[in-house]
Image: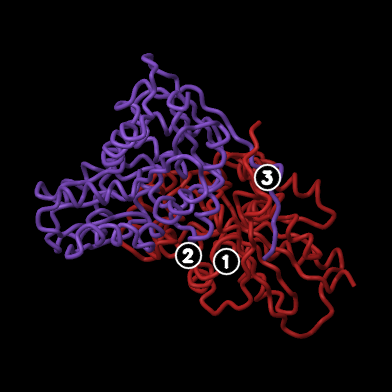
Chain colours: A purple, B red
Amino acid sequence: MKKNLPIGIFDSGIGGLTVYKVLKETFPYEKFIYLGDTARVPYGIKSHETIIQYSVQNGNFLLKKGVKMLVVACNTSSAHAISHLADEFPVPVIGVIKSGVKMACKITKNKRIGVIGTPSTIDSKAYQRGIKEILPDANVFSKACPLFVPLVEEGWIHHKITREVAEIYLSDLKKKNIDTLILGCTHYPLLKDVIGEIMGNDVKLVSSGESIREDLINLMELLDLKSEDKEIKEDLFYVTDSVDRFKSVGEIFLNGKIKNIYHIDLKVTFEFKEE
Amino acid sequence: MKKNLPIGIFDSGIGGLTVYKVLKETFPYEKFIYLGDTARVPYGIKSHETIIQYSVQNGNFLLKKGVKMLVVACNTSSAHAISHLADEFPVPVIGVIKSGVKMACKITKNKRIGVIGTPSTIDSKAYQRGIKEILPDANVFSKACPLFVPLVEEGWIHHKITREVAEIYLSDLKKKNIDTLILGCTHYPLLKDVIGEIMGNDVKLVSSGESIREDLINLMELLDLKSEDKEIKEDLFYVTDSVDRFKSVGEIFLNGKIKNIYHIDLKVTFEFKEE
């Protein structure tokens, strides 16, 4: 039965595990198949066309695994490729941008919303457009924070340098009197403490995992896609680069062990093809 | 005639332009074909196997363009893939690691040499092994500096944060009484001022472009590969991601204009293939 099939989730790398974690806690009886495209990470500094290509390839891999729906955990992929994925794929596709937009619009009182993300996500203006559709008179202030991902991957979560970089990136946003800040990259929840301290208690932080959680509950209800099984499933993890690094860094992200990680080989059919 | 063919040079992205720049200044009458694999950059956080695959694909692209030799400007590729490339390709292959090793061994007086680079380059121990072959009693001290590349790409060349990060990364090396430091990544020459100030005047910095320059002069002499043309050639640049970003960031690296940049499309034959 379709409803008993797994849920596919992909990210450019490891960051999407922050989304997976929230979803697994919410749906323990669902089986998840996670794909991290670690051989081509990061997406956030790459072009619109390249991000679409990579996202469609990732979606195709998960479709072949027989998933009942597709969760795009990567903000950069959601920003650039979500409509392509929705058009091309025969299963429901849900992405973190739309969910983040909806949650931010629900939370804000003064309609002044900040967005931080990778350069590609911010350049796409996807959050901005989404917010304006729901709240046409909202003020949206955005800022690309390209060093946040490498700082998290370096493990400098509570480091003095990370605080200083965050103060530089957030200094303009602090002056905008926003009451809501979207953490528009799946790495950023790990910097929640630092970002929260700098922005102050009056600014609510919206993270991708928490916001897509609501949408997934609703979607599975509406389409009757909830698994009937009542035992906790072992999930599968696929990565395009080294299993070892995904395991070691991923366990920091999940704050727990990861089993069942498999490498996917990209080498065989690849060749440069000039336009 | 073979000697009048172009020289192929590849890097994981933009950094190799620091090598290209030195070589073009040295050999203005040679035509260079540069390939930057910007759709998959950075290599420095990826695995041995993935780096070999990407490097071989890059080399094949340049071979099909009819180059007379191959310069591997990327330290990470040189560290992991140089022997594969040399075995597989019918043209001379020369990489930045070996050149950097030789120059450092020539410069050092106290045989205490430092090496900084990406995590993959440092993990490979390629510099260490190379130095020990020439100077078996040398002491080599190495340190991965994963934030240097994103800091350069953020344009924070002389930024306070970059200085602080460099002080953290280099603090152990400073205590080792080295007299020579290999900048084992093509982005690092842009941080020469900061690194030089921290390490002090007694430490000589060895960069990839300057060291491979010597080797290329010798190689072209030995194999009689110097072009007979006496007019300055227009070079060609190929990138796997956006032409615009390569142009804008690349012009900072070269401190000059770049013409003739072409996009290579990767999408057509790619598909996930499970092991």
Q: Which amino acid is tagged 1?
A: Thr
Q: Which residue occupies 62% across, 54% down?
A: B267
Residue A161 sits above or below residue A228 on the image = below
Q: Is mark 1 on a helix, strand or loop?
A: helix
Task: Provide residue A144's location: percent of width, then percent of height.
Answer: 33, 59
Q: Which amino acid is tagged 3?
A: Gln
Q: Which of the chains bears the disc numbered 2?
A: B
State the quadrant of the C terminus of chain A. Answer: bottom right
Q: Residue furthest bottom?
A: B231
Q: What element carries label 2?
A: helix
Task: Provide residue A217's location: percent of width, then percent of height.
Answer: 29, 33
Residue B117 sits above or below residue A4 on the image = below
Q: Which residue in the protein does label 3 denote? A: B53
Q: Which residue occupies 62% across, 40% down?
A: B272
Residue B193 horizontal side relative to residue B212, left or right: left
Which one is earlier in the sequence, the residue at label 2 or at label 3?
A: 3
CB within 8 Å, label 2 to label 3: no
CA–CA distance in space, label 1 to label 3: 24 Å
Q: Which residue in the protein does label 1 denote? A: B18
CA–CA distance in space, label 2 to label 3: 28 Å
Disc 2 and disc 3 on one polypeptide chain: yes
Question: In this orientation, does residue B114 appear?
Answer: no
Task: Provide residue B107's location: percent of width, then percent of height.
Answer: 61, 57
Q: Which of the chains bears the disc numbered 1?
A: B
Task: Provide residue B249's location: percent of width, then percent of height.
Answer: 48, 69
CA–CA distance in space, label 2 to label 1: 8 Å
CB within 8 Å, label 1 to label 3: no
Which one is earlier in the sequence, the residue at label 1 or at label 3?
A: 1
Q: Which residue in the protein does label 2 denote? A: B190
Which one is earlier in the sequence, the residue at label 2 or at label 1?
A: 1
